Image: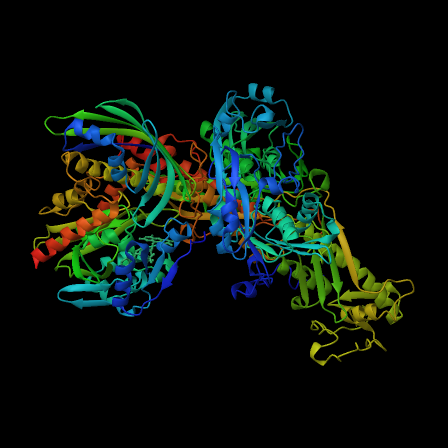
Amino acid sequence: MKIEGTHELRAARERVWQSLVDPSVLQRCIPGCERLEQTGENSYSTILRAGVGSIKGVFQGNVRLEDLRPPAHYRLVVDGKGQPGFLKGAGELELEEMGEGLTVIKYAGDVQVGGTIASVGQRMIQGAAKMMASQFFTALEAEAQTQAGEPPPQHGFFRTALRWLSGLLRRIMRGSK
Amino acid sequence: MIPAQFDYVAPVTLDEALSLLAEHQDEAKILAGGHSLIPAMKLRFAQPALLVDIGRLKDLAYIREEGGQVRVGAMTTHYQLESSARLREICPLLPECAAAIGDVQVRNKGTIGGSLAHSDPAADWPAAILALDAEMIVVSAVGERAIPASDFFVDMLTTALAPNEILREIRVPLPPPRTGHAYAKLPHPASGFAVVGVAASVTRGADGTCESASVGVTGVSVKAYRARGVELALKGGALGQQEIAGAATHAADGVDLNEDLAASADYRRHLAEVYARRAIERAASRVS
Amino acid sequence: MAQKYVGQRVKRTEDPRLIKGLGHYVDDIRLPDTLHVSFLRSMYAHARISGVDVSEALKAPGVVAVYTGRDAAEKIGPVPCAAALPDLKVPDHRVLATDRVYFVGHPIAAVVATDRYAARDAVDLITVDYEELPVVVDAEAAALEGSPVIHEHFGDNIAYRLTAGEGDIEAALASADRRLKQRIINQRLAPVAMEPRGVLARYLPGEEELTVWSSTQIPHLLRTQLALMIGMPENKLRVITPEVGGGFGSKLNVYAEEALLGWIAMQLGRPVKWIETRRENMQATIHGRGQVGEIKIGCREDGTLTGLRYNVVADLGAYHQLLTPAIPTLTGLMLSGCYKIPAIQINVTGVFTNKVATDAYRGAGRPEATYVVERALDLVAAELGLDVVEVRRRNFPKPDEFPFKTATGLFYDTGDYEAALDKALANSDYTKLREEQKRAREEGRLVGIGVSTYVEICALGPSQAMPAGGWESATVRIEPTGKVTILTGASPHGQGQETSFAQIAADELGVRIGDVTVIHGDTAIVQYGIGTFGSRATAVGGTAVYIAIERLKEKAHKIAAHILGADASSLAFSEGRYSLTGAQVAAGAEVPEPVVPVAQAPAAALPEPQTEGKRSLTLQDIALAAHLAKELPPDMEPGLSATYFFEPKNFTFPFGTHIAVVEIERDTGEIKFQRYVAVDDCGRVINPMLVDGQIHGGIVQALGQALYEEVVYDEQGQLVTGTLMDYAVPRAKMIPWLELDRTETPTPVNPLGVKGVGEAGTIGATPAIVAAVVDALAPFGVRHLDMPIKPETVWRIVSQQTSGGGR
Ligand SMILES: Cc1cc2nc3c(=O)[nH]c(=O)nc-3n(C[C@H](O)[C@H](O)[C@H](O)COP(=O)(O)OP(=O)(O)OC[C@H]3O[C@@H](n4cnc5c(N)ncnc54)[C@H](O)[C@@H]3O)c2cc1C
């Protein structure tokens, strides 16, 4: 299954690139990434708690960065296996500087899923993949925007997003009453 | 098709349920009608450690008129909504939408709250709830808040509900006079969920033109949405066949389209347009 | 014999218990101490397994044992394939995968635990090291040189090639006025029996007896095969088939799980049970159809066919199940349809793919053939601008040409194809339908009429043509108390033969239907039988019952003559009683009560038969006398029972006409039925309600193939339609009102005159529905569409040709 998309990040390309090759940043940005351990140059083993909404699964697998051409391009290769099945994906990321402090990331890749997810998740997989990609880039943007030395932003994905949202809503609600 | 192990509690008060959620956060899951959660658990896609069955909170199942609103308890079943004679008079979109869901067994067990909280991209209720500009009343151990429908659906299977919150009530403003409703759906041949579902609420001015329209669309994208482009095109205009058809062309503007064995993205876009046209035509024809 | 029951709409005697939930399916059978099995199945379509680690699973609470391919494969023989074809490549099919997995759902390990939940939980604790291998999904590509090879030692994926047919096909095509060709696809379908498979096995070490309860269509054949696989004496093995919730051919098989469970029960000395989940059912129970081919048709200007060639690739899956390679040969046999086609040729290439096996699914090869032939006739009609009905008429053999020999080597027993066609045309008011269609088209509406005239092959069949015997058996007994017991070797699982066989017996014996019990599906009770498939149970099994009854009556007749002291020729049988000719039996006399009303029967002894001074004897009197054996003719065997094994001399060939009328919504391509008219001829009808039920179900499954169903694997061999949320089985609201009618052309092949009806609906309806949609789109130049015809396909045709794209 092909997925592709474009994300605009309000951050300079250099900084985005730095974040994209920093394993601790990656761990924070990959949705549901519970562990990312270096196993070689640009390759890592990982535990992912991936999913959308109440539907989640734990995957163990590997992440590899290939064909690094700083600060414009790399290829991301991911595979994971777990109780709900397996997923494999490879995608090219292209970073383009679009003027002052604005980077556009184009990604295009192929995701394969197998096992239970493949046979019952048909109608949702594409959407879920896109959703996770967009979560990744949103987090990445926040990372790239933090200045060196600042504490890294907290993602802890769904929870932070939801906390933020409910906080926001509470504020709005109070304001409206 | 056997779920992983879980603990099960069936509290008898809402407070009890809320404190369980506060304690267990996202390790716990509310069980309402079970018609979305249990299938996910049987596939082991969902493996909650604790199920909090709110089936015994009977006072969460009701349909009331209060404060210019129809108030529906989250545990009200699809069937209860479908069969309410009063709703057919005052807010016919609710029973019409309910009747389009699944089959009799599903409608007897499934609840409106469960459907909204689950937020399946092809569920029927979100379209109607969006078109009716409803408000979700959600509670947690620390208090209550209201979420407008347009903010409630965040992404695929993701709502604005926090893990410690329960959707308690859905508040639907009573439709103004000269308002017509309709829900038009193409069911998926296997699941019965919406390949495309469009809920329309159309209010005519005294001169018969469109005073306002709201259109909720489900099945087309990762989450249900308001088709603002359609609404805008209708507003203030005549409600003739041509005008409606023209407005309906905006039904899938600006959304990422779902694609599956039942319909490609292209076809879905087209179906969204056709079903929007049908829903709006029917809604408009129901206002004299 | 008076026909009090036969021919009547007798309600199914099976139903009350089923409706009340009192029936017993495999899962309803509970034995103390039962262990439960859950399978780990491959999530890859093709992979090498370098290791299976079960140590964690073994430590899990409740787990008693875990078996892998290495433990079991050596001990249990291969899963059998009964199809004998020249040069067939037969892969070694072990009950659990050993070093490779070949399809998603391929079982790798079996966990045995104290309950289903513990077993299932422990499955997640097994780790398998897979090394992925290239996957072969597309059947046509599988046959090409350069394709990855699934079973390496075979060198390619071609399991067999077969050419069949008679007549000079080259000449027939060359000399035709017109030659047409068309690509034809019969997509893979999942049988989706309501009750999935299930096995319960118990070994009694003292008695050395293994009992296997299985949801199967073939208890005896299964027993024989299990005995061979497990290496156990067949007479110590008992297969019981309790209530079976549908099979449609998917349970006409011998599955790995059946043997494995039997073997595990022997290893552990405790009963073990496995109930298939729906997901397993979609992945690991056989699929049906799966043919991709091309037809070449030769015809004359008048529409008569000169020749038909079908080159087809059959998607067999990774392994052969019981009949996998044989199914396409049935397609070959039926390629003449109900037409005179002088030259026919089928060229089958059976290929291995990384999918579960295909095998018999309702119709089993015949729906594929009928679809091919009916599409061919429609193409000819379109080519020549003839009405589809006229083209059919011109190709029919006439009633006096029967038995009719086809170029596929069959002799059709009897048939009156025009009669069924004419009745269907009259019932549907075909001429008017066409006029209405014309008007509709003028209004821009898309209305289509599809006609299919089919013939099928039933009552399988003469043993010469069958892999494991084509006869069927019956024992009929009259018990001392006068009750009638029938033991049939057929294995009904929804068809209603407990009712229809009782109807036959009640009429032939002159007893009440309630006094007849039909027993089936227990190899320890019932004499060897073949089973229920191929629309054979009534035509072959029912005939065995009928003839056994005749045999029993011959004996009863002799006993009656002896007791009444009369010459046999002076006795006549009527209304359940042998009477001296001339003895007056009150006209319309009630069927006699059994001689011993149970409530009054003395506890210990049976009463003496009341024979003194009688001029007539009921069968019950005779049964009792036969058991007490005090008044029997010299040298006569006591008891009143007869067993008969009926060997049919030929198949039977039911036929009919189906007419579908649809209208297409221009906007969306949605297909709506306007009418559905069918006239089926299945020979003599025992119970019209059962026949209607079979036709209904058959049409529904045909409609599924035509419009909704398709098993989809992605390019990695992942099963995409793995649940009923994705695989679209037709629902009640998708079914039009079915206007059914019949003609009755009895067959001479059996004394009952019945042909069989279990699969007719599936065979006749698919082409009618497809033809109707194609006809609706004829104004757009459409002559053929592939199944399932989805609204999107239709919409693309309509929208592209009306406005050059979507609106
Ligand atoms: C065969 C079948 C066909 C169906 N067809 C359709 C269809 O055509 N259209 C359609 O729209 N739906 C369909 N459904 C889904 C059905 O409507 C479900 O009932 C509904 O989506 C969920 O409601 P529930 O009460 O069953 O919720 P559950 O399954 O009990 O819960 C669903 C989710 O919501 C959460 N939840 C439930 N209630 C609350 C609450 N009050 N507050 C916070 N969280 C809550 C649960 O924790 C869970 O995560 C179908 C389901 C089946 C099984």
Q: Position of residue C213 (x, y in %)?
A: 62, 55
Q: Does residue C426 appear anywhere in the picture?
A: no
Classify residue C312 as left or right of residue C585: left
C286 above or below C194? above
Residue C382 location, quadrant: top left
| Side (left or right) of A20 relative to B39 | left
Residue B59 in view here: yes
Image position of C449 with respect to C783: above or below: below
Q: Position of residue B232 (x, y in %)?
A: 12, 44
In depth, the one of C361 and C141 nearer the eye is C141
Give the quarter of the figure containing the N terminus of chain C.
Answer: bottom right
Q: Is residue B173 left or right of residue C653?
A: left
Q: Residue furthest right?
A: C634
Ligand 1 quarter of the rendering: bottom left
Residue B146 at x, y percent in the picture? 16, 58
Where's residue A156, x and y in %? Answer: 25, 45
Which quadrant is home to the C terminus of chain C?
A: top left
> Which quadrant would residue C569 be assigned to in this image?
bottom right
Using residue C762 as the reference point, say whether residue C476 is left or right of it.
Answer: right
Nearest to the observer: residue C44 or residue A74:
A74
Colouring used for the render: rainbow
Depth order, front residue of B11/C476: B11
- Figure label count: 0
Observer-nearest of B7 and C249: B7
